[in-house]
Image (cartoon, helix red, strand yellow):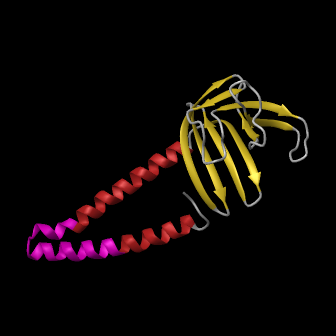
C-alpha cells in the first residue's frame, strides 16, 4: 500500500522511533553496568531484532520491484489508474491506485507469443479473466492507436467493456 506522503511519514516515524529507542537503550545499558539485571537488556535487543526485520522486509520488497521488466502496461483513469509490470522471471506486480493510494498484488504469469495467462481469474475488480492478449489497435473513441493488452475469453473473443491497458514498455523479442 502507498499514499501521498508515505515516505515522509515513514521517515519521520523512523527518526522519532530510533531516537526514542536509542535514548531508552543507552539509559538501560548505563543502569545495567551498575546493577547487572538482564531484563534491562530487553529493549536494546528487541530494538535490534525488530530493526533487522524491518530492513530485511524492506530489502525484499525493493528487490521484487527492481527485477528487470519484460512488459509494462498501464490504464489511465484520470484520478485512478492501473498498471501491470510483467517481470522477466515470470512474475508480475499489479498496481491499482486512486488519488495517491496504491494497492499491490503479486503473482505469476506465462507468456506464449502475444498471449499471457495469469495465475488468478480476477484481480481487484479490474482484471476479469486470466487470459490476456497483446494487440495492435486502431485509434478508437477513447484510446489512441498502438499496442494494448486486452482481456479475452477462453474462445479468444475480447471481453466487452473490460479495461484495456496501453503497452508502455515492451522488451519482448
The x, y position of residue 125, in whole percent, is 63, 48
The residue that appears at 41% across and 74% down in the rendered structure is 16
**Is 7 on the left-hand or right-hand side of 155?**
left
Horizontal and vertical percent position of residue 172:
70, 28
Residue nearest the viewer, comparing 118 with 125: 125
Magenta-tinted stretch = 20-42
Magenta residue check for 123: no
Image position of 167 with respect to 53: above or below: above
Per the image, is 35 magenta? yes
Q: Quadrant of residue 45?
A: bottom left
* Front-most of residues 114 and 30: 114
Q: In the figure, 24 relative to 76: above or below? A: below
Q: Main secondary structure of the magenta part?
A: helix
Compared with 126, 8 (above or below) is below
Q: Nearer the viewer, residue 67 or 32?
A: 67
Classify residue 169 by image quadrant.
top right
Task: Describe residue 24's horizontal placement relative to residue 89 as left or right.
Answer: left
Number of numbered callouts drawn: 0
The quarter of the image holding the N terminus is: bottom right
Q: Residue at x 64, y 52 (%)?
A: 96
Residue at image point 37% right, 70% down: 18
Which quadrant would the C terminus be assigned to in this image? top right
Rendered location of residue 23, percent (x, y): 30, 76
Could you say where residue 152 lies in the image, as x and y percent from the top left? 72, 31
- Asked if residue 88 is positioned above or below residue 168 in the image, the reply reads above
At 88% across and 39% down in the image, what residue appears? 145
Q: Is residue 62 left or right of residue 57?
A: right
Amino acid at each position: 500500500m502507498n499514499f501521498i506522503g508515505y515516505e515522509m511519514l515513514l521517515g519521520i516515524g523512523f527518526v522519532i522511533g530510533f531516537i526514542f529507542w536509542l535514548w531508552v537503550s543507552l539509559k538501560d545499558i548505563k543502569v545495567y553496568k551498575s546493577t547487572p539485571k538482564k531484563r534491562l537488556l530487553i529493549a536494546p535487543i528487541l530494538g535490534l531484532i525488530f530493526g533487522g526485520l524491518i530492513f530485511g522486509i524492506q530489502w525484499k520488497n525493493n528487490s521484487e520491484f527492481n527485477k528487470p521488466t519484460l512488459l509494462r502496461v498501464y490504464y489511465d483513469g484520470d484520478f485512478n489508474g492501473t498498471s501491470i509490470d510483467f517481470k522477466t522471471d515470470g512474475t508480475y506486480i499489479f498496481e491499482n491506485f486512486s488519488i495517491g493510494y496504491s494497492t499491490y498484488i503479486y503473482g505469476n504469469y506465462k507468456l506464449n507469443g502475444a498471449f499471457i495467462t495469469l495465475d488468478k481469474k480476477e484481480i481487484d475488480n479490474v482484471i476479469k479473466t486470466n487470459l490476456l492478449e497483446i494487440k495492435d489497435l486502431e485509434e478508437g473513441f477513447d484510446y489512441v492507436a498502438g499496442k494494448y493488452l486486452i482481456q479475452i475469453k477462453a474462445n479468444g473473443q475480447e471481453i466487452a467493456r473490460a479495461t484495456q491497458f496501453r503497452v508502455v514498455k515492451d522488451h519482448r523479442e
